[in-house]
Image (cartoon, rainbow, N blue to C red):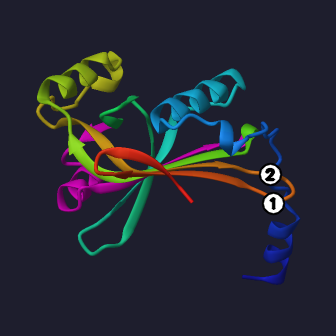
Amino acid sequence: MTDATRSRLRALPSLTGSAPTLDPGSVTADPVALFLEWLECAEHAGVPEPHAMTLSTVDEWGVPDARVLVLKDVDERGWAFAGTKTSVKGRQLDVTAHAALTFWWQPLVRSVRVRGAVVEASREESLADLSARSPAAREGVDADDWTLWRVVPTRIEFWQGSVDRRHVRIVFGRENGHWQLEG
């Protein structure tokens, strides 16, 4: 890295959004409900594409990979996304069925990280997801290859940034099927 690049990067502003106040003691003990609350807040704040997320996987050599997708659904079963089984992500998930999702809502200085095992939805759910896409988005897609997956989380982190660097993290871990707040 050159001195000029380093200086330019250091001069760029960060955490420039308008961070809502967050009291960790007042959040719900249900991370799905908290996520949906934060997603709705991002929508109301006008965050562009608040359902966009980074899906991180690893390849057969354990090398990380990532791409941006849209969230298809979220409920107690997990966070859903879709694509083809023969895509890079599909092949990677076939080898290592674990992934991480990252949501970044800059105007709110908020991030959510979700990680866990990945499971395939039923064939019916995958086909329903494919048919919900626009005709242009369905064109050329092999219906037998289209797959809806869910990340079944074992850990979810809600991060609220702060200009004074006193960031707030709320972390949920799942143990024996039950969510617990960590430290």
Q: Residue at x 73, y 38 (%)?
A: 108
Say whether residue 98 is magenta: yes
Horizontally, is 52 left or right of 124 in the view? right
Percent x, y of residue 44: 68, 21
Residue to which mark 2 is pinned: 162
Horizontally, is 181 left or right of 18 in the view? left
Residues 58 and 134: in front is 58
- Residue type at the position of mark 1: Arg
Say whether marks 1 and 2 touch (CB < 8 Å): yes
Work out how far the residue at label 1 is from the one at label 2, CA to CA, in angstroms.
5 Å
Horizontally, is 145 left or right of 111 in the view? left
Point out the image quarter for the C terminus.
bottom right
- Magenta residues, start to end: 81-106
Residues 129 and 79: in front is 79
Percent x, y of residue 160: 70, 47
Residues 158 and 126: in front is 158
Percent x, y of residue 41: 66, 27
Horizontally, is 129 left or right of 33 in the view? left
Point out the image quarter for the N terminus.
bottom right
